[in-house]
Image: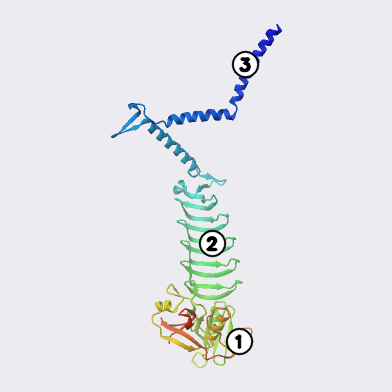
Amino acid sequence: MKRIFDTLFSAFRAKATAFWNRVRLLFTLSFWQTKVVAKARQFFSRLFDVRPRDKNDYYPVFRWLVSKRLAYALVISLCVCCLLLLWRVAADLIPRRDAGAVPTYRYDSLLLKFYNGQARVTARDGHVAYVGAVERGAAEGQGSLYNSSDALVYEGMFSNSKYNGTGTLYYPGGGVRYTGNFVDNLYDGMGKDYRANGTLEYEGAYSRGKRMGAGKLYGASGNLIYNGSFRGGAIVFDELLGKTMAEAAQMYIGAQLLYTTESESCIDMREIGVVCGLKDGSNSLEPEWKIDTVFIPRGELLLDGQLCRTVSEAAAQLGLSEYEGETPVLLPEAVVINLLEGDGALRFGRVEMESEAAFEEAITVHSYDRAYLAYIYSFSRDGLLYTFYVDRQNGEQFDFYSIAKAE
């Protein structure tokens, strides 16, 4: 009896072991990989076996016969490619919504081109670049622009994805750079320009990105230094001509230094970079000192939108010169030459001068080299006399220039 039981148990164990091995095989990764790969290989072998077997394996297309198997393979391949493409752009076709129910679109999303309303728009690298009003894919209305570091770049009004209307532009560090009106990304209208340290630099009118019209200029500490007109981004210096010292003091409020001799005077308005020659009016009906010449110690001048650095470039805007040659320097010219020479910005020598400080904002000049000759070119246009000072040995590039009223 025992032998019969052992035989039955051995037979059952053999069957059970075989069954268990088969079940365990079903749960191994290698089995399924082998089965899947084999089935896939078999499927694709049949799919791409486009060789026709007989005439029934063709589709007649005009004068050609197209293999049915080849047509099936192309259709299936096209469907697979379409599915992959849809999967790739699914994030764009189905906008994400944040907790506030504002949809988020990628910048090149197809649906964004048809969307109107509030939205978040992501850039190519994935950061949120814009939050605000959108109309058919373009920023339109109130919105905020961010850089890749999530720092605010601009907030304000947009039109056609450009800054248009009132807005604020920021430095990368977060400080306000400009606040005011924009037209097509350019400062245009009234606005305020700030330095990187937060101090106000300019307040007034702009046109096409440049200071243009009435404005106020502020110093490094934020104090008002000039109140007047601007053109092409620069102060209109010729409006100082003919102003009395009292009138000039209403326009220029910055630091200044007065130079005087027994018969000449000039004033260095250092914070706006000009030296003004003064005319004594004590012997006239208006017995006040007035500004008769403005000297600008820079080697460039903006004329009719053209930046001139040489006499030839200036002549192209001003016409023929009225005078060319050497002339003895006067006190304002000597002061400008020495200021430029001290800054290392001059190519010809210093004017010898004996002087002493009368008080903090005034220097008494006892004497200076009146035999010092400067080579000049003078032009007259629109009632103004432009004089350019050059180093004759080094071509016609001018080192500084002056503006006076033409007689």
Secondary structure state at the residue bearing disc 3: helix
Q: Which residue is mark 2?
A: 169
**Residue at (46, 88) in percent of width and height:** 326
Mark 3 or 2: the one toward you: 3
Q: Nearer the viewer, residue 139 or 50?
A: 50
Left or right of 57: which side holds 252? right
Q: Position of residue 109 (x, y in %)?
A: 47, 47
Say if 343 sits above or below 369 in the image.
above
Residue at 45%, 77% (x, y): give it.
Answer: 310
Q: Quadrant of the C terminus?
A: bottom left
Check contact, mark 3 vs mark 1: CB within 8 A. no
Q: Earlier in the sequence, mark 3 or mark 2?
A: 3
Task: Rate crowding at label 2 as few (under 14), some (14 to 19) or many (20 or more) other CA atoms within 10 Å.
Answer: many
Nearer to the camera, 298 or 246: 298
Q: Residue furthest right?
A: 2
- Residue drawn at the location 49% of the way across and 40% of the way down: 87
Residue linked to disc 1? 363
| Image spot of residue 253 (x, y percent) | 57, 78
**Marks 3 and 1, the one that precedes in the sequence:** 3
User: Residue placed farthest to the top in the image?
Assistant: 1
Amino acid on which disc 2 is placed: Leu
The kind of residue tagged 3 is: Lys
Label 2 vs 1, first from the N-terminus = 2
Tally of marks: 3
Q: Answer above or below: position of 122 versus 198.
A: above
> Helix, strand or loop at disc 1?
strand
